Image (tube, rainbow, N blue to C red):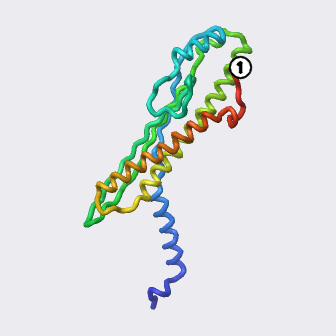
Amino acid sequence: MITHKTLPTWITVCLAVLMVVLSGCLRAEPVVEEKTLYYEFTANNKKEIWRQILNNSPQGKVNVAGNHAVNVATTEWELTAKHSYEGGLYRCTLKDVQTTLKITIRLPYWANKWQADQQLVENWDNYVRMVSDHEDVHRRYAIKMAQEYETELMELDSYKKCRDLKDAVKKTRTRVIGKYQAKNKWFDANEFTYQKNLVWF
């Protein structure tokens, strides 16, 4: 006869595996949607390139990662979360949490560079490659932000009142987004020290 104190080893192993599977289900990754857009321009020399960038670069976008006087390229993001509130007697819990992150990277595209001096083209390609690598850092910060936001929402305690839980959700969003906005600004401010393969153009 099997008592509750002497469970067979195979049952214990199965229960342990089940707990691992369930814990993995509770930590679903955010849905990440990414796209890259290009703003096109034509130029015949370096001076014209910078004039076109100043005229056509993606300025003034909402939720742009980083902080530059001139945005040669940008990483824009939109973070949303779907969830439900399960209420009971003196208990309100957050359920079915799923975050979605939309990332848009905007980069310059020199349409007629094949007409320009070969050395200028090579310098430009190296520069744009560095700019793309730079934006990828902002992209990875955005993904980490979404992951952290979803994890913190899932780990929120139950509250006696749903309005208090809703307030905790808002505060969590503000705190996490603020943290990664600061990280992005710090990276931009220190990129000349930490950016690998720094290229001037």
Label 1 secondary element: helix
30 or 92: nearer the eye? 92
Q: Amino acid at mark 1?
A: Asn
| Lateral position of residue 87 relative to residue 196, left or right | left
- Numbered-mark total: 1
Q: Residue furthest bottom?
A: 1
Compared with 98, 60 (above or below) is above
Q: Quarter holding the N terminus?
A: bottom left
Question: Measured from the top left, where is residue 35 in percent x and y?
Answer: 50, 32
Question: Measured from the top left, where is residue 198 in percent x and y?
Answer: 71, 29
Q: Residue at x 62, y 28 (%)?
A: 131
Q: Residue at x 36, y 62 (%)?
A: 158
Q: Residue furthest left?
A: 89
| Lateral position of residue 101 relative to residue 109, left or right | left
77 or 200: nearer the eye? 200
Q: Residue at x 54, y 31 (%)?
A: 67
Q: Quarter holding the C terminus?
A: top right
The residue to which callout 1 is attached is 123
Q: Residue at x 74, y 15 (%)?
A: 119
Other residues around mark 1 within 10 Å, as few (<14) / some (14–19) / many (≥20): some
Question: Measured from the top left, where is residue 42 in percent x and y?
Answer: 58, 11
54 or 1: nearer the eye? 54
Residue 140: quadrant of the picture: top right
Question: Measured from the top left, where is residue 170 in percent x and y?
Answer: 37, 48
